[in-house]
Each structure stands twice: as structure tokens, then as C-alpha cells.
Amino acid sequence: MTNIENFKSSCPVCETINAGRRSEEFSDRRKGLPGIWRLVDCLKCGAIYMDPMPSDAELQGYYDAYLKEGELVLSVGLGSRRPKLRQVYHAVSGDVDPRDFVEIPSGGRVLDYGSGDGNYLSYFHSKGVNIVGAEISDKLIAASEEAGLSMTRVDDFDRIPFPDGQFDVVYLMQVFEHLRSPRRFMQELSRVLKPGGRLYLAVPNAASAWRRVFARNWVSGWFAPFHLVHYTRDSLAGLGREYGLPAVDSWSRTPESWFRLNVKAALYRKDNKVENPRLFPDALPFKLPLMLLLRIVDLLVRERDCIVVEFSKR
Ligand SMILES: [Zn+2]
């Protein structure tokens, strides 16, 4: 699968042409979509990107298949009703949740880009924050609007549908890696932020120690064909700097749910729907010890599975 060759494509992060030297082919191990996708390593900036990039029509097709299953009803969970309990739980589970760390100035306007099931959006809304969500899926938009939340439709994958200088805070949780044109999009993020505004990005960490441990079974990160570009802290910070968004903070942790997914991918190598629950290791008696073990081991590694980078608009 791995080969040494030159790639004609240019890196979508640093724009270096022919910087890719190593490629690997991946199938979808999580949702079982048919197909093979190739990822190329950029030797210049450390990013890893899909080559060729899927077209708009292909992306739309993937997301339609992804969101097909089940009805979506927004529910306000315990995590929103009991913030202290949530923070304690997340300290143990390693979940990366913007409700725990995104700081919103009083009266500030916030954009939750790629708001998904509206979980975070509804929490901030309930706290009186002036927040708007953005999604591409009619189904997700309808579910959030049903719950009384303010939503905007995204029609163009490369454009944020707001005028300049609108927001004090923008956050994208596990969204930026789904975008095909990171340069174009970073420019868009910079454009919609007010001077001094903050941007928070959470993405899988291409430099994670767990990536090396799990290799091809690092399905939490690879997630072909949905994750199009994989970043390191440095490649993200470099990108922000180019568009007037210097990084002011960054950290990483390994969510237990991601780790468990990778354990399943490594154990059940023929399974192409590893998101489906299994007795081992998904049942509570296995899950809890695994969670605690991971918290201890995670202390020993420098680069963990999910990176969060905070940027400040100049
Ligand atoms: Zn690059």
C-alpha cells in the first residue's frame, strides 16, 4: 500500500507542489461506505490529505448516506443541566466539549459552525448567549430550529454565509478536518471574526502517539472519506498565522470514545462498521477500566488524539 513517489497535487495546507512522498489507501471502517481513498503525507508541513479530493457531488453523497439512519430529535441531556458533573466526567472520559473551555465575552456573538445535533448550541443558547449554528443538512437544521435555535444553511462548502466582522467567538468542533480547502476556509473564518475575536478548532491530531500505535486502525482519525485533511498543531498554527489568526493556546487529549473505536478496529479487522456497539469493549464493565487506564497512559504521551487550538484575530 505504501509507496515512494511524487504526487502532482499540491498540499491544501501549505500549497507546496510535489511535497507528498508517501501515500496510503483507506476504506471506510466506520460507516461501511464502498470505495477506496488515498491519503498523501506532505513532507513540508506535516499535514496529510486526501488525493484526489472528492467533488461537491461526491461529498454530498457521503453525507446523505451518513445522515440517512434514524430520526433526529434534539434533547437537552444531563451534560447541559449539570455543568459541574459534565466537567468531572469529561476529565475522566477525555471528551473534548466546547461547553467546558470556550470563553464567551459578555454580550458576545458566537458562531457554532457545523453545529451537528445542536447539543452545544442549545447549551449556550440556554445560557443566554447570542449564538447561531450553521449546517449543510436540512435534517440537522430542522431539528435545531424545532428546538428554537437560530440556524443558517451552508450552501457552499468553501464559504461562510455571513458578512465580515460579525463574531466575537467562532468554534468548529471536529469540523475543520472535513473541509476540502483549509486555506480558503481559514481566510473565511478570519473574515467573519471581529478584531480580537477568538477561534477554537478541535481536530484529530496527525501527530498523535496513538496514531502510531494503531496505524491503519486509527479510524477515529482517518475516517475516510469524511476526514479530508489531517493536521498537527504546527500546521494549524502556521495556517492561522497566514490569515491574521495567530494561535494563542493549544492542548490535546484522547477521548475514550475515540480510543475505544480504534481498539475495536484493531481487534475486529474485517469489520467495516466499527461504530456498531459490541459487548467488548463497549459494555460498561470493560469501558470503565479502559477509560481509567487511558487517563493514566495519556499522561505519559505528549501528543494525544484530539488537538484544540485557540486563535486570536489581529
Ligand atoms: Zn503541506
Image: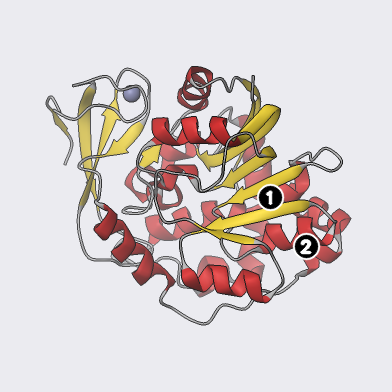
Residue 266: image x %, image y %? Answer: 38, 55
- Could you tell me which residue is drawn at 62 percent across and 78 percent down? 73
- Are discs 1 and 2 less than 8 Å apart at CB? yes
Q: Residues within 10 Å of mark 2 (few under 14, many from 20)?
A: some
- The residue wearing badge 1 is 97
**Quick one: 134 or 91, which is closer to the camera?**
134
Residue 122: image x %, image y %? Answer: 73, 63
Q: Residues within 10 Å of mark 1 (few under 14, many from 20)?
A: some
Does label 1 or label 2 sit earlier along the sequence?
Answer: 2
Q: Amino acid at mark 2?
A: Gly
Q: Is residue 231 visible?
A: yes
- Residue 57 is left or right of residue 89, and the answer is left
Q: What secondary structure is marked by label 2?
A: helix
Q: What secondary structure is marked by label 1?
A: loop
- Residue 134 is left or right of residue 156, and the answer is right
- The residue wearing badge 2 is 79
